[in-house]
Image (cartoon, rainbow, N blue to C red):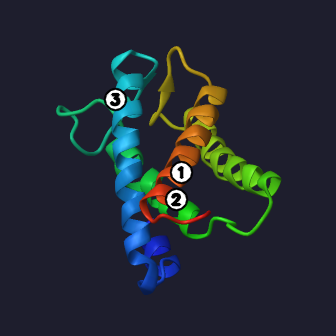
C-alpha cells in the first residue's frame, strides 16, 4: 500500500489524499470495532496490537484508507451517475474478492455471523460516504 500511495498520489494532490485517508480511518474505526465487538467477524492472527484492539489494524487503519485515498483521487468526476456507481462498485468488489480469498485460504479473517455481501455493502457505503465528505470538504461539484 505504501508503494501504491507513493506512486499514484501526485504531490499537488497530497492534501486531498490525506483528508480522504483520515476520514476513512474514522469510518473504519467505528464500523470495524462494532463488527468485531459484536462477534460478527474475528481476526484470529493479528500482527499488531493484539491486546489493545480486536480489529485488523493493518487493513482497517492502513490498507483500506489508502485504497480510499486512491478511490477519491481518481474518482470520475465528469462521468455520468451510472459510471460513478460502477466505479464505486468496482472498488468494493475488488476488496470483497480479496477478503473472500483471505477467508478461504488463510486464518487472517473468520466470519462468524457475517457474509461476503455484508462486507461488500459496507465497503460500498463507506466509499460513497467518503466521496460525499470529500465533496463537502473541498466544496466541489463532484
Q: Secondary structure at mark 3?
A: helix
- Mark 3 to mark 1 CA distance (whole Å): 23 Å
Q: Which mark is residue 135?
A: 2
Give the position of the N terminus as an image quadrant: bottom left
Q: Alpha-carbon distance for marks 2 and 1?
A: 5 Å
Q: Secondary structure at mark 1?
A: helix
Using the image as rendered, state which of residue 118 and residue 22 is in the foreground. Answer: 22
Residue at coordinates 37% horizontally, 24% vertically from top-left?
Answer: 34
127 w.r.t. 108: above or below: below
**Do callouts 2 and 1 mark residues in contact (Cβ within 8 Å)?**
yes
Badge 3: few (under 14), some or many (20 or more) residues near its Cα, within 10 Å?
some
Tag 2 secondary structure: helix
For the question of whether residue 104 can be seen, the reply is no
What percent of the width, then of the height, locates residue 46?
32, 39
- The mark that comes first in sequence, 3 or 2, is 3
Residue at mark 3: 33
Q: Which residue is mark 1?
A: 132
Query: Quadrant of the image for the C terminus?
Result: bottom right
Amino acid at each position: 500500500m505504501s508503494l501504491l500511495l507513493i506512486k499514484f498520489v501526485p504531490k499537488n494532490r497530497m492534501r486531498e489524499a490525506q483528508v480522504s485517508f483520515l476520514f476513512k480511518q474514522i469510518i473504519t474505526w467505528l464500523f470495524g470495532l462494532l463488527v468485531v465487538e459484536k462477534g460478527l467477524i474475528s481476526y484470529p492472527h493479528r500482527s499488531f496490537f493484539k491486546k489493545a484492539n480486536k480489529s485488523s489494524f493493518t487493513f482497517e487503519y492502513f490498507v483500506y484508507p489508502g485504497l480510499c485515498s486512491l478511490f477519491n483521487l481518481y474518482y470520475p468526476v465528469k462521468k455520468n451517475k451510472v459510471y460513478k456507481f460502477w466505479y464505486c462498485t468496482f472498488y468494493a468488489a475488488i476488496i470483497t474478492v480479496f477478503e473472500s480469498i483471505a477467508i478461504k485460504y488463510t486464518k487472517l479473517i473468520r466470519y462468524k455471523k457475517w457474509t461476503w455481501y455484508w462486507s461488500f455493502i459496507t465497503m460500498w457505503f463507506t466509499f460513497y460516504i467518503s466521496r460525499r465528505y470529500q465533496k463537502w470538504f473541498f466544496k466541489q461539484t463532484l
